[in-house]
Amino acid sequence: MTPGPGHPHADTADSKRDAWSRFQSSALLRNVSASPLLRHGAMLALWVLVWQLARLVEYTEHASVWFPVAGLTFALLLLGGMRAVPALVGGCVLVTLWIAADYGIALGKLELVCAGLAFAAAHIGSYAIGACCLRAVAARSHGSLPELVVGFLLIAAFSSLLATATGLWALVATKMMPLADVSATWLPYWIGDMAGVIVLAPLFTSLLSSLRPGGMARLAASISLEHQAATPRFKYKLLLTLALLAGSMWLAHATRSPNSAFAIFFLVIPYMWIACTESAFYNLLGVALGSFIIALLVHVLALKEFVMVYQFAINVIAANTLFGLALPSLIADNIKLRRLADTDSLTQAASRDCLEQRALLDIIRCRQQHLPLALIVFDIDHFKSINDRYGHAVGDKALKHVCLMAQQALRPADMLGRFGGDEFVALMPGNDRAAAIAIAERIRVHVNESELEGVHPITASFGIADLHEGDTYESLFARADQALYKAKQEGRNRAAWLAA
């Protein structure tokens, strides 16, 4: 939510946007974007820096509570495609050398480089497939955020599982890891990678796509820095959420009970609160910060025996947040679909189904409250000849014109619906037959006196019926339709009704 003009926080929000705009247009950023060498160097440095974050929260060899570099790799491949591969390969080889030194793996330099290339093929290849799949989903969903969120979560699970399988194979094949360790490593490896993708890929995509607007498609139009302004209360919401996070993890530390570790899942509630009240960017930022603190506190509070609980919690919280971001879009889509279903696309009158549903409710209400109800059925005289002589485009204009004349004569409580073709129905709860006759006559005169692009004066015929004891909508409509037939027999351009 962006503060409006005059809001006490508007100047702060504007200054933040101005600072970000200046950074986006800075000479440094332009030079990095223009030079392939500098661009790859920047991506390599960023990838290694993010990898170091994973090392901070690694609780066993080759497995972290979450693996943020997986999210960065996914985002770089999503935005840059194959252009990001050289920097990613360099990063994989470089970190392999560091891992070998840290773990004391006795392999030669050439063997370690080969191990790094094997890891690069497994890691980059898996997430390249995921990025390609997500681009395909984005193209087919036409910007529908709910579809994109579901597709992203499924792709994140699949691509991280593929990265786990191929990554472990690469580690074993290059003697970086004994085969016996695979059974104990594969699940935390997978969940950690998946958490890194679900939590951080949207955030990195948002940041990197705003730095390079010419990059490939974003996850969604709403996940961008153009909508990143937070409400003034965001910091308090975030502080409350992080306090609850720390409290739940301290409880697990104090009791050492597996059951107490599950208290972390209650964080879904405050994160959904943030998701429903804050912009997409700050939701992603809040989830990323909370996930990092969860991973860090696992080490600080010595909660490694509960690590799987916290890994799954990170994934659940991130997935719920993404669905929370998609909810307003889903509601808007449903409202739009409902409006389309309830409205005739040409005349903007109510659809036939909508009219009939409203009539059933109004008949019940008028009976309960002892109110009258009247129905007018009318159509354009000799409408087929208008189409034949002037064309269907003019015929459509005639339909819209007559509909407008009728709408202007009706009350807000009345409903005008298009029954089909050139036939319309006006439902008037609270009006008796005399009032309906007066309204029909007013519509008839307005239609008759109006002209439409050289067409001879348009006329219309009207049939009127009022609600009787025991009437249903079908019987009421049938009497009004019979009255319309009577008006046509009597010479058209008139209103008629049947005697009770």
Image (cartoon, rainbow, N blue to C red):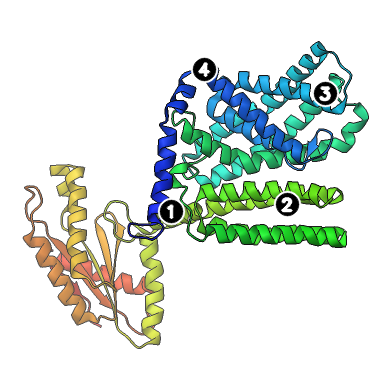
Q: Look at the image and tell me in which quarter the N terminus lies.
A: bottom left
* Residue that numbered label 4 is attached to: 36
Q: Quadrant of residue 425?
A: bottom left
- Residue, far top: 110
Q: Earlier in the sequence, mark 2 or mark 1?
A: 2
Is residue 198 visible in the rendered image? The answer is: yes
The one of 193 and 207 positioned closer to us in this rendering: 207
* Residue that numbered label 3 is attached to: 100
Describe the element under mark 2 as helix, strand or loop: helix
Q: Disc 2 vs disc 3: which is toward the camera?
A: 3
Looking at the rendered structure, which numbered label has been put on residue 69? none
Q: Earlier in the sequence, mark 1 or mark 4?
A: 4
Mark 1 residue type: Leu
Per the model, the C-alpha gap separating discs 2 and 3 is 31 Å
Position of residue 475 measured from the top left corner of the image (x, y, whole percent): 35, 74
Mark 4 residue type: Pro
Where 379 falls versus 365 (above or below)?
above
Per the model, the C-alpha gap separating discs 4 and 2 is 39 Å
- Residue, far bottom: 370
The one of 47 and 12 positioned closer to us in this rendering: 12
* Residue that numbered label 1 is attached to: 337
Q: Earlier in the sequence, mark 4 or mark 2?
A: 4
